[in-house]
Amino acid sequence: MEAYINGISYYLPEKVLTNAALSDMYPDWPIDKISKRIGVESRHIAASDEYSSDLAIAALNKLIDEFSINKEAIDYLILCTQTPNYSLPATACIVQDKTGLPKSCGAIDISLGCSGYVYGLGFAKGLILSGQAKNVVFITAETLTKTLHPDDKGNRALFGDGATATLITSQPDTSRFCGLIKNFKYGTDGSGYDKLIIKNSSTHSNKQLHDTIFDEEGNFISNDDFLYMNGNEIFNFTAFEIPKLVEQTLKENTLEIQDIAMTVFHQANTYMLDFIRKRCKIAEDKMYIDMKDVGNTISSTIPIGLRRLLDENKIAKKDNLLLSGFGVGLSMAGVIIETEYI
């Protein structure tokens, strides 16, 4: 038995925050210079009354419509989010009810960030290969912008909100794109747990602006109610560990880097991706980099990239695709997808 990706859809909130709007908000801040480094010109922002469940529901409904999916055939729902509606219940349970999936459907949240899509594919494949499910919907949904401090200009420029829905099945559908999910490699360095963290978490909770720490120039440093990211430490983790992960993922699948038609890494920022590309000796035309209109959408960046590559006809039959996610945790994962049909 095998497991296959048989459809990907994504949803982005209607509200768009452009660099021009950021420049108006922070007139003394060189957003144009920063944009060239991170590769983001605009990003979609969830409305004040729009939560991760809302984005997830929209993405799943879009998947169902685009690929004519019979909801009654879905027997498991996995939702990856680090911005759940509530500490409990699982947001997946809300999505199951609101989208009309059958009550016989399993539903669970997994709490992972930038490596979450690859991990979720691994969980879905495990459910299928163990015979627990035949048709799994895997959703990624984040409203991370709700966790950003108003004075945190850097992260406000980088991150955007969004959701994706992927259908993973036990049988290939030869009428459309189908990706065979091959072998995985994982990694964790929990000693860096505090390098990307929200100490007081819940997107429904009231955030307090007092007790905010600024540097001598008035730039935001931290507030326990909001996202904190040590960019230098995250970069160091990525720069040194991801090339090793890529090598291990290729070895696990008995492949060489020249056997890969396209790589889709987590879209952290363009500077980091280009650095990784050079260290991994990946040809420029074989690495997907395009986040200018969405920003860093956490666990949704890889499936958004896959769907866009498909829409642009940049994936062919029998291509080997290398997917890799990395970040908060510190966590990382890699997998090979072999395109069966197109």
Image (cartoon, grey):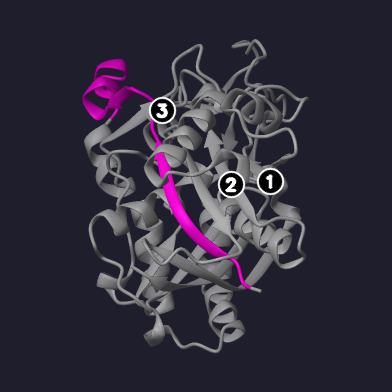
- Is disc 1 in contact with disc 2, using a CB cutoff of under 8 Å? yes
Q: Which mark is residue 76?
A: 1
Query: Which secondary structure lies at badge 1?
Result: strand
Dot placed on the residue nearer the N-terminal end, 1 or 3: 1
- Is disc 2 in contact with disc 3, using a CB cutoff of under 8 Å? no
- The local crowd at label 2, few if under 14, some if 14 to 19, many if 20 or more residues have their Cα within 10 Å, is many
Gap between marks 1 and 3 measured at Cα: 39 Å
Magenta stretch holds residue 213: no
Judged by depth in the image, the label closer to the viewer, 2 or 3, is 2
Q: Please name the amino acid that badge 2 sits on.
A: Val
Quadrant of residue 21 within the rendered picture? top left
How far across and down, in percent of the image, does residue 277 sit?
A: 38, 70
Q: Please name the amino acid that badge 3 sits on.
A: Lys
Dot placed on the residue nearer the N-terminal end, 1 or 2: 1
For the image, the number of numbered tags is 3
Gap between marks 1 and 2 measured at Cα: 6 Å
Gap between marks 2 and 3 measured at Cα: 35 Å
Please, is residue 302 above or below residue 246 in the view?
above
- Can residue 215 be spotted in the picture? no
Magenta span = 2-29
